[in-house]
Image: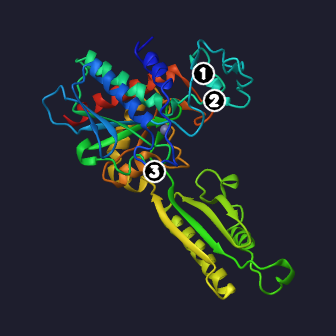
Amino acid sequence: MKYDVLLPYFLKYVQINSRSDEHADRFPSTQRQVDFQRVIMADLAEIGVTDVHYNQKSAAVIADIPANVAEKVPTIGFIAHCDTADFESEHVKPQVHKNYDGHSKIQLGDSEFYLDPAVFPNLKNYEGQTIITASGDTLLGGDDKCGCSELMTFVKYLVDHPEVKHGRIRLAFTPDEEIGTGTQKFDVADFDADFAFTVDGEAPGKLDWGTFSAAEFTLDIQGVNVHPAVAKGQMVSAVKLGIAFQNGLPKDEDPEHTDGLEGFYHLLSFNGTVDNAHMEYIIRDFERDGLERRKQVVKDLVAKMNEEQGVKRLTLNMHDQYYNMADELKKHMEIIDLARQAYRDEGLTINEDPVRGGTDGSTLTFMGLPCPNLFAGEENMHGRYEYTVLESMEKAVDVLIRIAELNYQQNK
Ligand SMILES: [Zn+2]
């Protein structure tokens, strides 16, 4: 095995429940993330990393790997998130399937569930490799325990191999990525890196630096409820106004009818009665002006319906969530080129398809820390079919080391 600590770290970390909770009103959202971060801190100490602290403001573990060269080169940050997604996460029992034959179904533990290459064709890319799954009852948590264990393995490698010349490196292990709040309080000044990479991506070769721009809105609708017997001309149904609103949005511009570079409006929830209704939506678009145009469509529709009602029955609350980091990163293409060069040097085919979502890096980039996302080897994230491939994780570590080396060689 190429890095003998990688698999042990991974198997240990996925068995620690560190799920976040979007309904909690504390930060970080769950204590179990902090407990997992303590394990990370102990493991860093064991490797021999002496400068490690817990930043209270960002609820993140921050570690420093000092430069082993005299020249001043840019400080690189690497970031992984400690929480796992909203799916059963207690008693994860990782299953290691060595030397996969590239075509068979893989049973998840002794459950009724299988990873079937007919359903998940990426499996066919991993003939002869080691597939790691959960046991059918839980997620695996490779998102982002892959990134966490890769960062630890990377650090161990640098400590054990002083011949690898590198500048100063900063690591962060952050909370609450899955609920979208983890990096809003990130202490960019304390992290003190010139640029960074999140290590939280899919198959080898994937390099994410384009994301959606995003907004969300709620719509509260007030109806008029009177007895149906005498309703004529008086009753105004809030739920029917909600249906009319949804039907008034551009047809088929929703997640189930769009892909590639197309944006959408997405109705997340709709609760209501005749008396009142509440709707929650998100809006996504790769272009910033496309996002603005969609927001205007919503505002115009609300205004038109209120005008038709002759009284304000629809109340709109809208705000932006994050923006396409490509808009910022285009000003820092040397960072993307550094990652591209490392991928090429490691023999990878680069895949830069934009992410139909956001990343922690989107938030960080607009906070002044340019932050594309590197692959970590995650597959089928957020559910029982989640798996990862040991060789993909090894490649991710190769890339981290290569990025550190190249950053020194190109900037010394
Ligand atoms: Zn993730």
Q: How is the image coloured?
A: rainbow
Residue carrying label 2: 122
What x and y, as percent, mark residue 343?
Answer: 42, 31
In the picture, measured across the screen, residue 212 lies left or right of residue 194, that is right
Q: Does the residue labelled 3 lie within 8 Å of ligand 1?
A: no
C-alpha separation, residue under disc 2 versus residue under disc 1: 8 Å
C-alpha separation, residue under disc 3 versus residue under disc 1: 42 Å
Q: Residue at (34%, 50%) from the top-left corner?
A: 185
Q: How crowded is mark 2: few (under 14 residues within 10 Å), some or many (20 or more)?
A: some
Residue carrying label 1: 126
C-alpha separation, residue under disc 2 versus residue under disc 3: 38 Å
Amino acid on which disc 1 is placed: Tyr
Q: Does the residue labelled 1 lie within 8 Å of ligand 1?
A: no
Q: Quadrant of residue 233?
A: bottom right
Quarter of the picture containing the N terminus is top left
Please, is residue 179 above or below residue 378 in the view? below
- Can you tell which of label 2 and label 3 is closer to the viewer? 3
What x and y, as percent, mark residue 222?
Answer: 65, 76
In the rendered structure, are the residues bearing label 3 and label 1 in contact, judged by CB atoms less than 8 Å apart?
no
